[in-house]
């Protein structure tokens, strides 16, 4: 069945490549979000609220 899909003239390799790239990057971002420790996330969340005078 899949060989018939690959033999067709309307099979768009660029679309498949884009979809695979998007899915891979999405999975990498999800893994990075769930693996990151909460202390680092809390520190980054507070960065916009900190005064500019306090440089670390």
Image (tube, grey):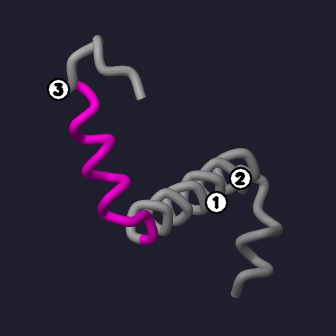
Total marks drawn? 3
Identify whether 44 is placed above or below 3. Answer: above
The residue that appears at 72% across and 82% down in the rendered structure is 2
Task: Give the residue pinned by disc 3.
Answer: 49
- Please tell me whether residue 49 is drawn above or below residue 18 in the rendered image: above
- Near mark 2 (Cα within 10 A), the count class, few <14, some 14-19 or many ≥20, is few
Would you place residue 39 above or below residue 47 in this image? Answer: below
Provide the major secondary structure of the magenta segment.
helix
Earlier-in-chain disc, 3 versus 1 = 1
Q: Residue at x 21, y 25 (%)?
A: 50
Picture quadrant of residue 14: top right
Mark pair 2, 1: CA separation = 5 Å
Which residue in the structure is indicated by mark 1?
Answer: 20
Which secondary structure lies at badge 1? Answer: helix
> On residue 56, which mark appears?
none
- 3D distance between C-alphas at marks 3 and 1: 38 Å
Residue at the spot of label 2:
17
In 3D space, how far apart are the residues under numbered discs 2 and 3 (Cα atoms)?
41 Å
Quarter-of-image position of residue 53:
top left
Q: Are marks 2 and 1 in contact (CB under 8 Å)?
A: yes
Residue 20: give x, y in percent of width and height.
64, 60
Residue farthest bottom in this picture = 1
């Amino acid at each position: 069945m899949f060989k018939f899909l690959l033999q067709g003239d309307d099979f768009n390799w660029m679309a498949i490549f884009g979809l695979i790239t998007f899915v891979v990057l999405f999975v990498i971002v999800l893994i990075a979000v769930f693996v990151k420790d909460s202390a680092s996330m809390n520190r980054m969340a507070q960065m916009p609220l900190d005064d500019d005078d306090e440089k670390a």
